[in-house]
Amino acid sequence: MLQDAARFLRTHDDILLIAHVSPDGDTLGSCFALYGALLELGKHAQVVCEDPVPAIYRFLPFSDQLIPPEQASPAEAVVCVDCADLARTGRCELLFRAAKATLNIDHHSTNDHYAEANYVQKAGATGELIFNVINCLKITLNKNIASCLYVAITTDTGNFSYSNTTPDTMRIAADILDTGIDLPYLNRCLFRTVPFPKLKLHALGVTKAKLYDYGRIAISYITLEDIASCGATSEDTEGIIDAIRDIDSVEVAALLRESDDGLVRVSLRGKTSADVSKIATRLGGGGHKLAAGCTMSPPVAEAAEQILGFAIELLHGVSE
Amino acid sequence: MLQDAARFLRTHDDILLIAHVSPDGDTLGSCFALYGALLELGKHAQVVCEDPVPAIYRFLPFSDQLIPPEQASPAEAVVCVDCADLARTGRCELLFRAAKATLNIDHHSTNDHYAEANYVQKAGATGELIFNVINCLKITLNKNIASCLYVAITTDTGNFSYSNTTPDTMRIAADILDTGIDLPYLNRCLFRTVPFPKLKLHALGVTKAKLYDYGRIAISYITLEDIASCGATSEDTEGIIDAIRDIDSVEVAALLRESDDGLVRVSLRGKTSADVSKIATRLGGGGHKLAAGCTMSPPVAEAAEQILGFAIELLHGVSE
């Protein structure tokens, strides 16, 4: 599989790389690293994505090279990077279908091997697979390529803290660090840069949090007025639920927020044993044991009351 | 030096390990890892510290073994772990002075080689040196020892993000992960567990922050009443300054807090080029370019005004 990918990239000289829609650090870092490696080999390469590079990733080397599918020149060889299925390529799927040769490099276990050549393998990040490919092609890592790989890996492994972090992840990171990348700078860009409105909104979310059931349940809610008062956007609510979940006594955390469509979006988090997807399922939502969500009707205060009731039942084992 | 340490530990059978005062993750993780390793060798060992294990580190394997110097039995061999000088051992210095043989294992560049045998080497954490010693003694890492080493290394390298993180750090972490330690659990204990009063105080510190000079300066202050209103303690202010420094536009951040002694403690942070130690020095304090501090007279609001004036002068290059 690794050899297939290396052979594919050696064979073709005009290669189009596709990042998935709503691009994250792994798909972008992986694409730009591979782009830089292909340039080292003297090949022509393009990086394409339906969506632009999010502000937080604009420090990435080669990030100014990303183009929308409409601007891409047709290429005979196309590589999907970190896309679990073709739908993840969005409007770039047309470029994939038009290509003579296709390759799929991805670490998602649900990947359905949709290309002619597939390098699909479990890993903390697709960036690890790109590292292996670059290594296999005997391309020397430069700092730009290494920085992109570092960003791919650290963002998808929660800065080397999630359960997908393996000894291999660490050994690859060591080889990446051998190039002398600026670790404090990259970490500041990724994890230590927050707009003031978002920071204020997070503080408000924490300030409004209330604990129940001896502190085992934490619930907070954010109204449209809260968001406006901080000069923030609804996307800035991301992460508030994690801060509330991190309270030492908490087993079940919930964040409710008013949505522009008039509904109430509910994020639920468990910490150890409580299965919060049971709450979400009762309300027509879904998710995993420790992270789930659902949509409810306003008013938000009443929705929060109902969530509290379900959370108490969950923790106290009341039959449903 | 490594060989000296290994020979020392092989030679002696009754060994007392000293952690430094106000113990952190590196000194504790390193001591408990070495303690576990010495048990594997069938030796008698004690871990001694002037201060108890802070609540956040009580999940560490062997942490219930820590004893104050008064409870320690005299031992012929003493090892100081992560202590840059003898003063860092606090009241444990008496045990060091009473020992027949002494060893000093530490990664601080200022270490003055105060013991008979010294294994002092630059590293991200003393935990890396302990790993090397255990390796050299051919002791197989078990999960308990490995978990202690992981905590030592990750806490002293800012979870592999500070400039002291080297390729060696990552390779050692890979070997540690080979043992199958519970990475998500350890990370949750270390970085994702916060008491509600502290979280509320941090939110208050952010809420009270004000930006000046096109957002390049951020200043906040915490009164004794603020701390009381959150049910928090003055130690819970730790970290607020970092959250404020992380605001994207900020170059200079200051947090002022009322102290129990009636004075105002000032923490200063720079981000890239501004040297905040210049502000601290003008007010009789000190520190480094990007992290400094000083003490001022109340009232806190007036002190904040003065800090703002100095910060504007610093950023606009007014001669001092």
Image: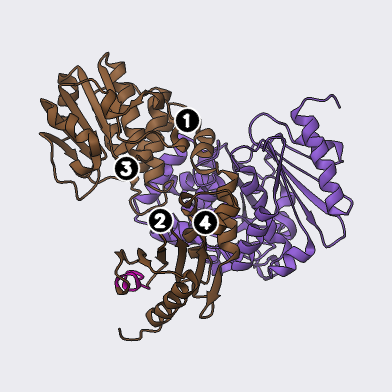
Chain colours: A brown, B purple
Q: Which residue is mark 4?
A: B191
Q: Looking at the image, which is closer to me, B42 or A8?
A: A8
Asked whether the viewer can see residue A299, the reply is yes
Mark 3, chain letter? A
> Which of the image's four quarters has the N terminus of chain A?
top left
Q: Which residue is mark 3?
A: A125
Magenta span of residues: A274-281
Query: Could you tell which of marks 1 and 3 lies nearer the N-terminus?
Result: 1
- Amino acid type assigned to the residue bearing label 3 in the image: Ala
Q: Which residue is mark 1?
A: A59
Q: Dot 1: what SS? A: loop
CA gap between label 1 and label 3 equals: 20 Å
**Magenta stretch: residue B21 in it?**
no
Mark 1, chain letter? A
At x 48%, y 40%, the residue is: A190
Asked whether the viewer can see residue A135, the reply is no
Local packing at callout 4 (Cα closer than 10 Å; few below 14, some 14-19, many 20+) is some
Q: Which label sits on residue B183?
A: 2
Q: Is residue A66 above or below residue A234?
A: above
Q: Position of residue A111 (x, y in %)?
A: 18, 46
Query: Which quadrant would residue B253 be assigned to in this image?
Result: top right
Point out the frontmost of discs 4 and 2: 4
